[in-house]
Image (cartoon, rainbow, N blue to C red):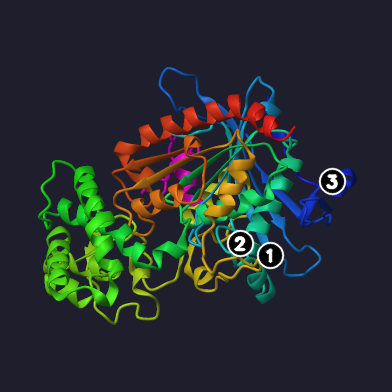
Amino acid sequence: MMKLSRLKKALSAAAILGILAGCAANGAPVAAAPDAWTIFAQGPDQSVQDRAGLPPVEYAVAWSALKLDPEERDSATISATAYLMDCDCDVVARPVMFLFNGGPGASSSPLHFSIGPKARGKDRTFPDNPYTLLRSADLVFIDPVATGFSRANSEEGQARYLGIEGDVDAVNRFIRVWLEENDRTGSPLVLAGQSYGGTRLANLVAKVGDLDVRGLVMVSPALDSGAGQTDLGHVFALPTMAATAWRFGRSDIEAETEAESWEIARAYAQSDYLLALQKGDLIGADEKAAVAAKIAGMTGLSAEDVAGADLRIDIQFFLENVLAQDGLLVSRLNTAVTSPLPSPEVNDHRPAAANDPSLGLGRSNVIVSQDIAEYLAQVAGVPAGEEYRSLNLDANFAWDWRASAKSPRFYVSSAPVLSRFMQEKAGVNLLVFAGYRDLATTLLGTQYALTHNDLPQKRVELVALPGGHSPYDEDTLKAGIADRLHAFIAAATVAGADKNQEMNP
């Protein structure tokens, strides 16, 4: 059984030689310094009642941190919380699922308390989560540098790890050290990322080809930033805008369901609307007026505003104006959520998107969650008084979006890296969740990225849900999402190894 006592609290001399503090370009191990790895663990073991009719799941909890540059006094750190099920089984054969959210600057807490064994209550309690995946896989929730309890600690650490490549390097190194420290280097892996975590995951797979990756899960992934900066971005946004207006009674679309309204708008967006946008300044006045009227009817905006925007509606403009008569701002992350329209001078020190009703930031750029800190102190022995950063927009604003690798085209997309990995690994399937109510990473934009980058379509599944950027927040969707993930992990564990071996004899 996987007891808490198996978790190593100090490094032996042999372990020091075997632990990875970093990876060379070819993924070869590099020796770690003695103080690179820290584990806090606290017993007794926990239990959760997840599925009716089945015995409770017994499990151990461990929080661990890796110093990324232990030779430096103010080394940056990356940390994670792990949940390991007690079982009379071959522990190494049991899947390990590594999960992270996005931002960049977001901790793993949204996934942590939706998929982990405990949910996060509004009353600062952490009740059992009946939708946890712990019965199917051991779960490791990674907090990237500058989120959760992870820290940059210096200007050098911030410059090194708050960026596309340094971030992937840190997560890759943590995964490898965690597997080594927990004697799980031979375990099948499932990797999951949400939002910018989809970008991180797509770039990470290029570094982990030597590991036994069986499956990939993405939630509302940001995969193709390039397409969204062109006319295609407006095409992608229109169906979600129209479905939002339909749900609030502001659209002239005749439909029975939100999904039907989205589909009607999608058909128009990818045909007449796209053709009109492609004409650019050559579009005739009559056609432009007709398209403006059509879009206005779908979205609840005025034809004058649509025409004045050259038919290209800014998402923030839509969010601030579709319910302006009611004095409401609509959330980009979940268009079912609203809040009173803020006055122009409120939080004028940052982009308007940071004032999203779903974020609840107030005037600060950082959300500190004392209840999560107290929970991790109780179950995993993290020192009391530590500050847990659920969301850190300062890290987002400092992010380095440049990549050192030269691309044959000036285009920002991580999807081709994901495609190459899946072409090489015939046993790896990809499961993607996306919501009709998400204007941060739109459903149509996600569908486009998954179907325009030479991904093996038979091994890619896109699940469209009536939810926002975090569809698992919807009570009516939780059971269905959990069932799909349980089935996905089980299928990946059984089938993945043989197929990957066939491709890499």
| CB atoms of marks 2 and 1 within 8 Å | yes
Instruction: State the residue position of label 2.
Output: 145
The residue drawn where x is 38% and y is 68% is: 230
- CB atoms of marks 1 and 3 within 8 Å: no
Q: Quadrant of the N terminus?
A: top right
Is residue 192 on the magenta stretch? no
Q: Amino acid at mark 3?
A: Gly
Instruction: Find residue 386 and report its horizontal and vertical position in percent.
Output: 58, 60
- Residue furthest to the right in view is 13
Q: Which residue is mark 1?
A: 76
Q: Nearer the viewer, residue 109 or 185?
A: 185
261 left or right of 157 in image:
left
Q: Residue at x 18, y 65 (%)?
A: 322
Assess disc 1: are there few (<14), some (14-19) or many (≥20) residues with their C-alpha within 10 Å of its C-alpha: many
Q: Kindly tell me whether residue 337 is visible in this rendering.
A: no
**115 over 143 or under it: above or below:** above
Q: Residues under labels 2 and 1: Cα distance?
A: 7 Å
Q: How many marks?
A: 3
| Label drawn at residue 18 | 3
- Frontmost residue, 271 versus 499: 271
The residue that appears at 57% across and 49% down in the rendered structure is 418
In the image, the segment drawn in magenta is: 108-129
| Above or below, comparing residue 120 to residue 353 in the picture | above
Front of the two marks 1 and 3: 3
